[in-house]
Amino acid sequence: MNSLKTKFLGLSTIIALMVVTLTIWHHLVTQRETLNQLALQNSRILGDTIRNSVSTFMRNGENDRVADILAEVQKEPSLEYVQIFDETGRILRAGSPESIGDLVPAIDLIAYRSQQLSTAHDHNGKLYQARILPIHNEPDCYSCHDKSQRVLGILSIHVSLDELVSLQSQIGTRTMTSSLFMFGFLILAITGFVLYYVENPIRNLVKAMNHLERGEFDLASVTITTSKEMAQLSDKFNRMVDRLRNQIQEMVRQEREITISKEKLSHQEQIQGMNQTLEERLKEIEYLNKTLEERIEEIEEANYRIADLAGELESKNTTLQQAVNRLSALYNMGLAINATMNQSKLFQLLIGKTVETVKASTGYILLLDKETNELTVDGTYGLPVAPAANMRIPLESGGVSHWVIENRKPLLIQNINDADNFNKVSRLGFTRETVICAPLMIKDEPIGTITMANRHDSSSFYPEDLELLVTIAAQASVAIKNAQLYEDQKVSYLNTVQALVSAIEASDAYTRGHSERVTRISLALAKRLKLSPERIARLEQAAILHDIGKIGIDVALLHKKGKLTEKNIQTLHQHPQIGVKILEPIRFLNNVRKIIEQHHERYDGKGYPNNLAGEDIHLEARILAVADTFDAMTSDRPYRKALSFDTAVNEIREFSGTQFDPQVAAAFLDMIENGNLRH
């Protein structure tokens, strides 16, 4: 409330409000008087016109026409009534014939007698303008009226002022609206004037003063052009700022000069003492310089010797770093290949790691088939064209692997153009430039070779690269032999268990060949669903062994021909878990055991033994469930005859989405429709 802007705007608003209020009042009073004069003038003209018409008709002896003209005038909406009465107040003529003979309102008689010929009055809540006009007896009327009768009648006209009042109200409303608009515009204009011409310049000056108070002279300048006075004020303020800045700078400069003078005076004595000491030190320095020159010559000789030693050390460090890198690569490769028992993965791992270690662009492993004296391609990298499946290379002279196997030692060819005994173009479809090859040996017998050809930087292989490849080949030979032993052991396990399953099925005419049929259907479904080779292999093992748990079920129950009791069914439901326990010692069947355990689970979660549902069941188990159920339905059982092929297919279709995975069931039905599975 203390701001100049607020006080100025408040005072301006009060003054403007008073001016607008007085203006509105003056306009309303003037309008009211103008309308009243207009109503009076209108009633006077109307009265004179009617009186003249009546006088004319009476002079012409047409007294009947007087009633007609009064009746015609009475039809005007703005007229309350029009009458002619005598001096006693009796109505002689009227626009309404039914009022003839009645007495006029007292206000008309009083107005006549008091000679108030024009009056305004309120009657029944309405405002009227009354006009009283006497009709005098003229010589032309003596023939019909007595000369002594001065007034023949008094004309009374009552005009309604409602329309004028309504017009006055409308004019007043418009006056108020325009005045309020003018008041608002005036306030906005004053506010804009104050903001632009007063507040903004003052605010800029205050902002500049704040900068000046903080010592920010460069920011304290202000330019105001809103008015001549403000421009002069800003110009004088800027000059004041400049003078103040110059004065402060001059004061600072003087203080600096005084301080420097004081420091010079205080240090003169110290400088003199230091000069004496400096002369003594200069003499000592001259003596030291002579000694230093002698020492520099000795240091230069020592530096030459150190440079020679550093060169030798750098060369040895480079060789040592290469050895460390190769040992690290060999160690990492040993960890990787010893953790892999799958032969195809092992071969690709060996080739990939070896190519990376020796920086070769092409690499491959060839294994020797001693029965046919041929080489098989078991791992490649960087070949322009992938070799055909089951490709075999005859062991003939001219080949690098032939020479290595025949001589049982590694081979280094730094430039193939200098080796006339070897073919420049390999049977694997690429051109050799530089080659290293090492034999894969088991108990001093070659089982194949590992070969690296060409380098990314087009350089040649060196003896160090061959030594590294020989070391890798030794590790690779052991890893390959271990993988082969592991595969042989796994096949032996599977053959043993499969023989056991076949023996069980052979003893039961109802289930003979069941595992083979289930395996065939399962593999067909897996291929249609595009499972990976690893998953297909697991599914095949699970399909062969899925009923191995029936070894733990009583044979009498398996061959029972009567209806199975609830207890019999519960006992039969245990065979997946029994199969899991039987296969538990065989570690490489860990994933297979899960498939066997789940192959009687239902897609809707109502299966056994764990009530799994949907995606919680392995896809391989869902495939096996369809294949096992279909073969069981189309095979004879002790307790029922086999269902027809079409009936079994309809069962698969009907229980899709409840007992069976709808995706697997759809693949099975599609396989049936395409004729890929026949009864």
Image (tube, rainbow, N blue to C red):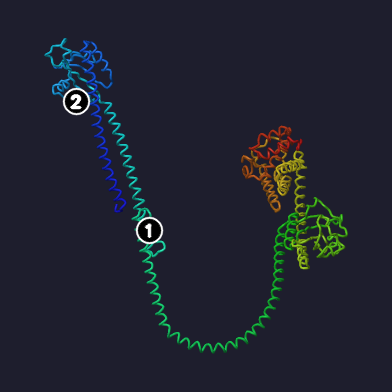
Left/right placement of residue 314 relative to residue 210 reads right
Where is mark 1, residue-wise?
207
Q: Amino acid at mark 2?
A: Thr
Residue 50 appears in the picture as rendered: yes
Residue 442 appears in the picture as rendered: no
Q: Is residue 575 above or below residue 367?
A: above
Helix, strand, or loop for circle 1?
Answer: helix
Q: Earlier in the sequence, mark 1 or mark 2?
A: 2
Query: Could you say where residue 518 lies in the image, as x and y percent from the top left?
Result: 73, 41
Where is mark 2, residue-wise?
119
Query: Could you say where residue 102 lies in the image, as x and y percent from the top left?
Result: 18, 15
Measuring 71% from the left and 32% from the top, which residue is drawn there? 647
Q: Give the crowd class for mark 2: few <14, some 14-19, many >=20 residues within 10 Å.
A: some
Left/right placement of residue 144 relative to residue 559 reads left
Q: Amino acid at mark 1?
A: Lys
Q: Give the crowd class for mark 1: few <14, some 14-19, many >=20 residues within 10 Å.
A: some
Q: Quadrant of residue 572?
A: top right
- CA–CA distance in space, label 1 to label 2: 71 Å
Q: Along the line of sight, which residue is nearer the eye, 17 or 470?
A: 17
Q: Along the line of sight, which residue is nearer the eye, 244 or 381?
A: 244
Helix, strand, or loop for circle 2?
Answer: strand
Query: Could you say where residue 73 lies in the image, as x and y percent from the top left?
Result: 26, 17
